[in-house]
Amino acid sequence: SLTGMVLSVLVILLLSVLYETVKIGKAKVLRRAVLAIPRSLSHDVLLEQDGDSSGFAFSPSRWFVFHVSQTLLHVVQVVVGYMVMLAVMSYNAWIFLGVVVGSALGYFM
């Protein structure tokens, strides 16, 4: 039906936007993880406490949280990506158009 097709295209459009959003979120988490690693990995820097006033103390637990966050975002990105791919593989022009428009909107936002 027409209503079912419109809802399907809307859902696929939103999934495409979600895919782009997760991709950007993953890049932001990667940037934070890289900034959490000190430029110098000397013994003194690695032994500093988290309460350092400069805010640049290396914290393996903080880096681990960033790594777990990246992993979870990657899993979400892969799952959503395969769902969008399967929708495109239906060879429906309207669904394909929903993916294209959703990807464009997601990237634009």
Image (cartoon, helix red, strand yellow):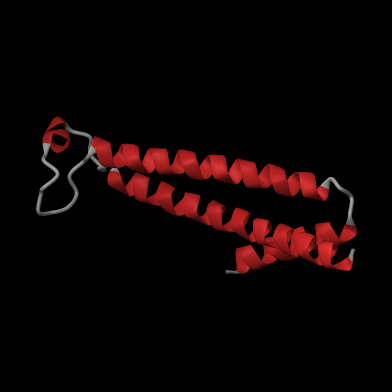
In front of the other: 41 or 31: 31
- In the picture provided, is 92 more to the left or to the right than 26? right
Q: Total number of numbered labels?
A: 0
Q: Is residue 38 above or below residue 9?
A: above
> In this orientation, which residue lies closer to the viewer: 35 or 50?
50
Identity of the residue drawn at 70% across and 42% down: 82
- For the point 45% across and 42% down, the residue is 70
Res 38 → quadrant: top left
The image shows residue 78 at horizontal and vertical percentages of: 61, 41
Which residue is pictured at 89% across the width and 55% down the height? 92
Q: x%, y% of residue 13? A: 71, 62
Q: Residue at x 61, y 69 (%)?
A: 108
Does 44 sit above or below residue 4? above
- Which residue sits furthest top? 43
Q: Quadrant of residue 68?
A: top left
In what quadrant of the picture does the N terminus appear? bottom right
- Quadrant of the image containing the C terminus: bottom right
Residue 102 x, y percent position in the rendering: 70, 63
| Residue 24 rendering spot, x and y as whole percentages | 52, 56
Query: Position of 4 compared to 70: left or right?
Result: right
